[in-house]
Amino acid sequence: MTIEFITDTESEKRVLSAMLHSDVACIDSIESLKESDFYEPFSQNIFTLISKLYRAGINPTYVEVMKEGHTLGVLTTPVDMEKLKYVAEHYIEDGNVKWWVNKVKEAAKGRAMQRLVKKYTHQLETEPHDVPNIIREASGEIFALAMDAESERIVTAKELAEYGEKRLLERIDKYRQMQEEQKLVGEVLLEGVPTGFPLLNKLTLGYKPGDLILLAAQTGHGKTAFAIQTACAVCVEAHKSLFYINTEMTKDQLVNRWGTILSGIPMQQIRDASLRNEQIPQALAAYKVLSESGFFTSHLPNLTPAKADILTRKAKMQYSIEIMILDYVGRMEKFDPRMQEWQVLEQIVKTQKQLAQNLEIACMILAQLNPDGTLQGAQRMKNECDLMLKLIPVADQEAADKIQNKLGRAYEPFNYRIFVDKARDTQSGFSIPIVFDMERQQIREAQQIGTIRNG
């Protein structure tokens, strides 16, 4: 049975050309398409070359693709080189690249359907006695093709239970292996990246893929210090990758914070360079540690949700990030100037939650608290997040005593607390005592020094 396969080479060329000219087109195309979605072997090869370069952090221009193709022996004939040049020059980036991507996918689906028809026609001709089974198999494959996503299947209780058993056994094995290798984080096997605080690690099992974490504090009370502490725990201590979107600090301010956090040298000395001779190697060693970490950042004073989305997807694709931190939500520009502030903030948080789920990373958003401790702008943001933390100063010893009595534990002197305001899958409504060394911009959990008997 001969089939003339469905093709759409025009759309293929437009997608490839857009990828040669646009960052956004690369992200949309690489996320949505695979090599086999293209019909022409030439288009398959070019898509693979562009994807490889982009994932490696190399801008996939016409020249770079030509060089890589020649090195790998993919673009060797004058015909292929002319075809690439024609695509680059004649199918210049289209503003609606997603439309062309969908056209390529539709054609690929059409070919897949044609192959299914051919396959089951052959089975009906060779096995006419087994029609009911053939129909069942065919309907299953056709339905899966129509749904186009494993996540859209209806999962049975049996499948869910089997998955639960498998994951539990995997985690038990991993826990025991890490015990032997002494790689547990404070005797806790994390499901996500470390939080930087032992008790928070124990309660949450880390910031997990798909989690949206909201960290709120008043102006000047440690939001950015908390974010950098998280980055230190993730990138330096756990050797994982993190993307930090910075809307406020200059590059100098950011490196000053890293320098003091990693060296322990007061920030003022880092800023004005009034270091003693013995402190200079200490400070330089701190930047060496930073250089070898998985910390990635972008400074975006004029941040929009679209920019955050594109840059985070790019960071995930190129650097395999496991968490993104947005510092901070109040600096994001409006979708629509007619929207009220609470509507804007609620919409931003919803898009970040979708981003966390789609990319399977954790997203942390920094937000502002009012002087009375309420969330500035939109209480509805709390409804969207999985974990909401408030970083709150402890006013005096009386306030510290109340926290210790409630916890039933005595701590070293502490000046801040993390209040777990909401936690979707663990305990909430309690405080974690924190020591915030403002001079060195270091935040750590206060050490327990005893227990308190109430009554």
Image (cartoon, rainbow, N blue to C red):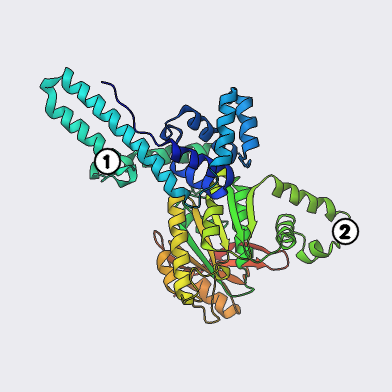
Left or right: where does residue 20 sit relative to residue 386?
right
Residue in view at x 16 percent, y 23 percent? 124
Viewer-proximal residue, 436 or 69? 69
**Residue 142 or residue 414, whichever sits in front:** 142
Outermost residue to the bottom? 372
Of pointers 2 and 1, the one earlier in the residue sequence: 1
Q: Nearer the viewer, residue 75 or 399?
A: 75
| Disc 1 secondary structure class | helix
Residue 159's label in the rendered image is 1
Residue at the far left in the pictured view: 129
Amino acid type of disc 1? Glu
Left or right relative to 30: residue 146: left
Where 304 falls versus 46 (above or below)? Answer: below
Viewer-side residue, 96 vs 300 = 96
Q: Position of residue 19 (x, y in %)?
A: 54, 43
Label 2: which secondary element: loop
- Residue in the picture at 51% in, 62% down: 305
Q: Is residue 360 visible?
A: no
Query: Are there few (<14), some (14-19), or many (20+) residues within 10 Å of tag 1?
Result: few
- Say which quarter of the image contains residue 153: top left
Mark on residue 189? Answer: none
Q: Look at the image and tell me in which quarter the N terminus lies.
A: top left
Specify the label residue 276 is tagged with: 2
Name the spot of residue 317 as percent of width and height, x first.
Answer: 54, 44
Q: Residue 34, can we see it?
A: yes
Name, please, the residue furthest toward the top.
126
Kind of residue at badge 2: Arg
Q: Quadrant of residue 424?
A: bottom left
